[in-house]
Amino acid sequence: MSTGEAFGRTIQLFLVDGKPTGLRKASIHGWTGVLFVSGASAFGDLTARDEVDRTGVYILSGPDLDTAGSTRVYIGSGNSVSDRIKQSALKRDFWETAITVTTSDDDMSKGHAEYLEARLIEQTAKAGRVTLDNGTHPDTSRRRLPEADIANMEQFLANLRIILPVIGLDMLKPQPKAVTHTAQPVEERTTGEVQFEIRHKSGVKATAVEEEGEFIVLEGSEVLTGTGYVQHDTATATKERLLAEGVLVPMEGTQEPAKMRFTRPWSFTSPSAAAAVVLDRHSNGRLEWKVKGASQSYHDWQQAQAAKQEAAE
């Protein structure tokens, strides 16, 4: 393995009561960090764990009741995570998932936990993927720790970036440059990326790129609305959110079915999720999206890429 090449990690996920919906314990091989994850039904099992009655941080997450299709999180810390998370959970009715982060050797100090809490809040706000329920954003520069301790906590944070998406909470991942670098023309910020398009018989045109595993519909793309087709609840919630946040705006002068337009890029979890919003119906995005200027579908393009990679190995 060459220097700088990505290497694999072993993530251990233990179902405490043998049920996938019950209390779960997660860790990375060789790391002292220990995470417990529970829903409301297993919350008592979570707070009863000895490993949770330690200094650390915690996260409460659930649907954002103010924004359809969005997630809201609260991040906190305490000398006894068990006590603090119980207090926080009683004050918040949005949460559906509780996550605690402590260490197997009980070696995290109050200063470490407060630094980690501040950095988690800072990085979550910067990523902009969820709504923060925290009223204040602690200043990490005021968390005075020795240089070596800061380095250790930054490595701890790096491991959380790896393990949190595995347990279903991707709140720290930076947005793709196609979303964030909007001051640059589309051609510049998507250099090297293959562009895909939908050209529908209704006249709707949409353009997208795939970056870091995310499917991003670019600004200026058009969307059908009011077609009367049955929509999946997720697609409906996503469209409501995009309208509420001004990402989608109605296009004046359009005939039935009406159209809307993306005012800025938006990242979707899959080509199908993007196509469902663009076409206002259930859609197989792997077939609907075509390589721009060609007839090759996203599916065929992906298969061709896989064949090239296999031939190169």
Image (cartoon, grey):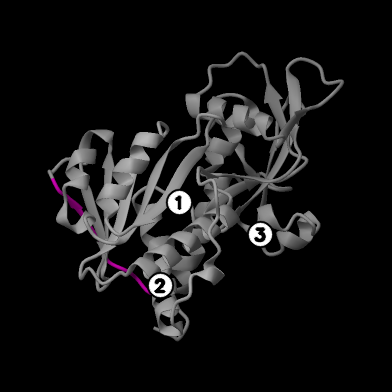
Q: Quadrant of residue 114?
A: bottom left
Which residues are the magenta region? 7-16
Q: In the picture shown, does residue 4 fall above or below 45?
A: below
Q: Could you classify mark 2 by the number of other residues whose Cα lies within 10 Å: few (under 14), some (14-19), or many (20 or more)?
A: some
What residue type is disc 1 on? Asp
Secondary structure type for disc 2: helix
Q: Is there CB contact under 8 Å for labels 2 and 3? A: no
Closer-to-camera residue (289/25): 25
Q: Could you classify mark 3 by the number of other residues whose Cα lies within 10 Å: few (under 14), some (14-19), or many (20 or more)?
A: few
Q: In the picture shown, does residue 78 fall above or below 266?
A: below
Task: Name the residue located 48 percent from the left edge and 75 percent from the top edge.
Answer: 144
Q: Is there CB contact under 8 Å for labels 2 and 1? A: no
Q: Which residue is mark 2?
A: 153
Label 2 vs 1, first from the N-terminus:
2
- Separation of disc 3 and disc 1 at Cα? 17 Å
Q: Nearer the viewer, mark 3 or mark 1?
A: 1
**Residue 99 in sight here:** yes
Q: Left or right of 119: which side holds 153?
A: left
- Separation of disc 2 and disc 1 at Cα? 19 Å
Q: Could you classify mark 1 by the number of other residues whose Cα lies within 10 Å: few (under 14), some (14-19), or many (20 or more)?
A: some
Q: Which residue is mark 1?
A: 170
Q: Which residue is mark 3?
A: 177
**Residue 204 in sight here:** no
Q: Left or right of 145: which side holds 31?
A: left
Quadrant of the frame with the N terminus: bottom left
Residue 101, image x, y percentages: 31, 58
Q: Left or right of 292: which side holds 95?
A: left
Q: Which mark is residue 65?
A: none
Residue 204, image x, y percentages: 74, 30
Q: Is there CB contact under 8 Å for labels 3 and 1? A: no
